[in-house]
Image: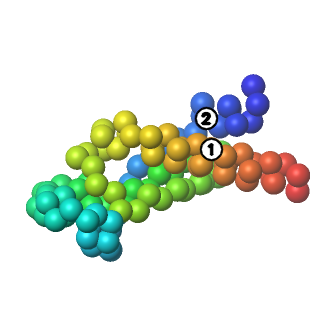
Amino acid sequence: MNLLDTIKKQADITITIHPEDTHPRDSFEDAQDISSILESLEHNPWAWCIVQVTAQWHGLTATDYLFGCSFENEREFRKCGYYDDMQENCFADLATQATAIRAA
């Protein structure tokens, strides 16, 4: 098994959301979409947020961020293609870090 495959099997993944500083109108043009996001945000932090995906493996950490997100919940985020892409970015970063340590 190569290093990247090992990392994919062994890394611990966490998902964290942060408040998005921008206004939804900066990403959406439809007034109804913006209104819906703002209304949902009153009770749902996933309605307008920054999503952070972090992978940890043998003391190494890699993080990827997605800004301007609007999801119903974490489950919806996990089903979208962004989650898989963000994990892959983290795995690749961990492999790069591990390779650099081996070479040092």
> Residue 8 shows which numbered tag?
2
Which residue reaches farthest top?
1
Check the picture and name the quadrant holding the C terminus.
bottom right
Is residue 19 visible in this depiction of the protein?
no
Amino acid carrying label 1: it is Phe
> Residue 29 shows which numbered tag?
none
Which residue reaches farthest right?
103
Q: Residue at x 35, y 44 (%)?
A: 77
Amino acid carrying label 2: it is Lys
Is residue 8 visible in this depiction of the protein?
yes
Is disc 1 surrounded by few (<14), some (14 to 19) or many (20+) residues within 10 Å? many
Q: Residue at x 75, y 25 (%)?
A: 1
Counting residues from the start of the chain, the first of labels 1 and 2 encountered is: 2
Horizontal placement of 4 versus 103: left or right?
A: left
Horizontal placement of 28 versus 89: left or right?
A: left
The location of residue 16, given as percent across then percent down, is 38, 54
Q: Residue at x 74, y 51 (%)?
A: 96
Quadrant of residue 43 within the rendered picture: bottom left
Name the foreground residue: 70 vs 1. 70
How is the structure coloured here? rainbow
Secondary structure beneath dot 1 equals helix
Name the foreground residue: 73 vs 56. 73
Q: Residue at x 60, y 30 (%)?
A: 9
Horizontal placement of 57 versus 3: left or right?
A: left
- Placement of 67 over or under 57, stated as above or below: below
Disc 1 to disc 2, C-alpha distance:
6 Å
The location of residue 48, given as percent across then percent down, is 27, 61
Is disc 2 surrounded by few (<14), some (14 to 19) or many (20+) residues within 10 Å? some
- Placement of 79 over or under 68, stated as above or below: above
Q: CB of mark 1 within 8 Å of CB of mark 2?
A: yes
The location of residue 39, given as percent across then percent down, is 11, 61
Q: Which residue is mark 1?
A: 91
